[in-house]
Image: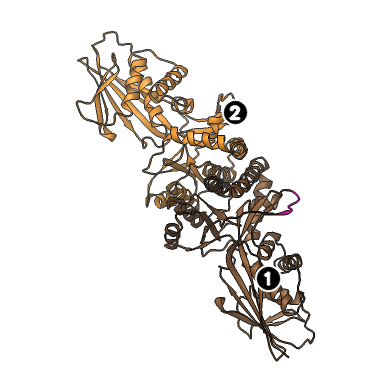
Chain colours: A orange, B brown
Amino acid sequence: MILIQVTARAPGKVILFGEHAVVHGKPAIAVAVDRLAHVTLTGRTDSIIRAEISRLGVDGYLNLENETINTQGYQIEVGLLKYVLKALKAVDHRTEPGTGLDVTVDIEMPVASGLGSSAAVTVATLAAASKYHQLNLKPKAISSLAHLVELEVQGAASPIDTTLSTYGGVIYLSPDVQEIVRLPIDWDLPLVIGHTRRQGNTGELVESVRLKKESYPSVINPIFESIQEVTEEARNALLEKDENKLGELMNINHGLLDALGVNTPALSRMVYLARQKGALGSKITGAGGGGSIIAYCPEKMDEVISELQKEEQAFPVKLRHEGVTCNVIE
Amino acid sequence: MILIQVTARAPGKVILFGEHAVVHGKPAIAVAVDRLAHVTLTGRTDSIIRAEISRLGVDGYLNLENETINTQGYQIEVGLLKYVLKALKAVDHRTEPGTGLDVTVDIEMPVASGLGSSAAVTVATLAAASKYHQLNLKPKAISSLAHLVELEVQGAASPIDTTLSTYGGVIYLSPDVQEIVRLPIDWDLPLVIGHTRRQGNTGELVESVRLKKESYPSVINPIFESIQEVTEEARNALLEKDENKLGELMNINHGLLDALGVNTPALSRMVYLARQKGALGSKITGAGGGGSIIAYCPEKMDEVISELQKEEQAFPVKLRHEGVTCNVIE
């Protein structure tokens, strides 16, 4: 028996335009970024499956049969381990049920920050397990399975994250039918992420916007319409690399998100600090209520990052053209 | 010859809803507030007209014949004295051209802050001069003349400020034809004003919004439409004294103003501080780019004011039902 080791890497993502409105049938644009989740599977001689996310100080024993995670009595937030468990279960083709695995997860992005860490971990786990079990699943299968895993763990999930972790690149989610269209963007789209310690609760935020729409349909519907038009204009700006237009549209989209009530003092402060230090545009990314902002500042990244770092976490990302990748050490 | 003294008092105003959109034919709501401009005319035995705004350290000699202000060589910002000069000129019925006046102006509000100090001074000057010269102009005439004075001094002006300084109360400017409708609001509408040291340039801000509309009509038109609907909903909320709704609508309107690009870091910070300290709603008032915010916080005025005062000027105002008033001491 040869104990092989498989490592898969999948990118995280940010939503560029259209968050919240996308829940109401409007288009959105999202982009894979070069912050990766690494998942390594190493064969064991025993039948144990042990998983570890060292960066978060999380580890546990996974039981695929009854789908439980044993943390040996420690009351830790297993969080991402649930995704690992469900992903391994989804492609469990171990010929001998007793064959164990060491799973190590490393993530280059803050968790629960709107950067799609769970999708990246899920996709990387699926890709690694597919390779390990010599299933050689196609990207389409990995993407679909990953979406199912997210649905199982979270109850609700957008296919945006799992699509981008699988394929990389930039996607446009078309209005109404929300078909995923990959946009041929051939430049690097450097962005700064600013990340607050406070996390927003996506479900609650989506619900609060829905209630606002219910209370004031004549007020909120035109806001969604404006976000739709921002997203359509931004699609062209991305394809044409019209940097100033891209920035302006980010600023407008930010104000519209503020109008929907998902801004916070900390996010607002970062958004304005970034603009003051030279960002062409900056906005909340994702659900808001905490989480992250993005700033587009191709000429001033260092200034913007060091300014934001005075108060919060900040780091650069760029477009990751490549999706999930795998390599095997035998 | 009896030297009489006439004092007139006229209120300032704040725009509650619809600023900027109103320039593009949308409705707006504005309210007279209990911060007044006091203008006192006292007869002199000589032919000199001397005007003084002691609070601003401004004084000068006004020549109504050639419409000049002589500040005796001091390079001071005559600012509001121009309005005094034009208003006195507009109702100059001195039977003997040589009869002088002492004009003292006192204003209870920051200047160039969106609170309509120039309209209040103009209306008070017109009312005082009308009484002094025994013309007894009707409010309608005072309001019209004041608007003409503002047009003459500024080049462009909205009739909102001069109407409110003349009549007090709350006005709704209807869409398209922008007819002024006085709303029968019978409660006090307590507000907190937060005022930044930085002044916005109204003309430049209006132009920047116009350019944005020209660049992205499909994006900006729905924003104006949403502001229109916010204003219509707010009209009902005011009439019904629905405080929570009023606050929510202020927050939405603020985000839409942010989307139009007229927010600043200082305004944004005050708006969020006010909400954190218990405001039901808070927003930019007026052109933005500096200037003032308003917060509606009937239960928490002291907390909001003391928080805002840590960084900027802040003070309470309430609806002034009464318009310009006059009294005479002989």
- Number of numbered labels in the structure image: 2
Q: Which of the numbered marks, if any, corresponds to residue A137?
A: none
Q: Main secondary structure of the magenta part?
A: loop
Relative to B171, A75 lies left or right: left
Discs 2 and 1 share one subunit: no
Seen from the viewer's position, the closer of residues B199 and A46 is B199
> Could you tell me how far apart the alpha carbons at marks 2 and 1 are, in whole angstroms?
53 Å
Name the residue nearer the viewer: A220 or B232. Answer: B232
**B160 with respect to A186 (left or right):** right
Location of mark 2 (residue): A175
Q: Please say if A125 is above or below B197.
A: above
- Residue visible at 56% across and 68% down in the picture: B109
Give coordinates of residue A217: x percent, y percent: 60, 36
Query: Please, is residue B110 above or below residue B226 in the view?
Result: below
Q: Nearer the viewer, mark 2 or mark 1?
A: 1
Pointer 2 with pointer 1, Cβ within 8 A: no
Q: From the image, which quarter does the C terminus of chain A lie in?
A: top left
| Residue B258: % across, % down | 56, 49
Residue indicated by mark 1:
B122
**Mark 2 nearby-residue class (10 Å; few <14, some 14–19, many ≥20):** some
Could you say whether the residue bearing mark 1 is in a helix, strand or loop?
A: helix
Highlighted magenta segment, given as a residue range: B176-180
Give percent across and percent down for residue A253: 55, 42
Quadrant of res B16:
bottom right
Task: Report which quarter residue A138 is drawn in.
Answer: top left
| Chain of the residue displaying label 2 | A
For residue A19, say whether it is visible: no
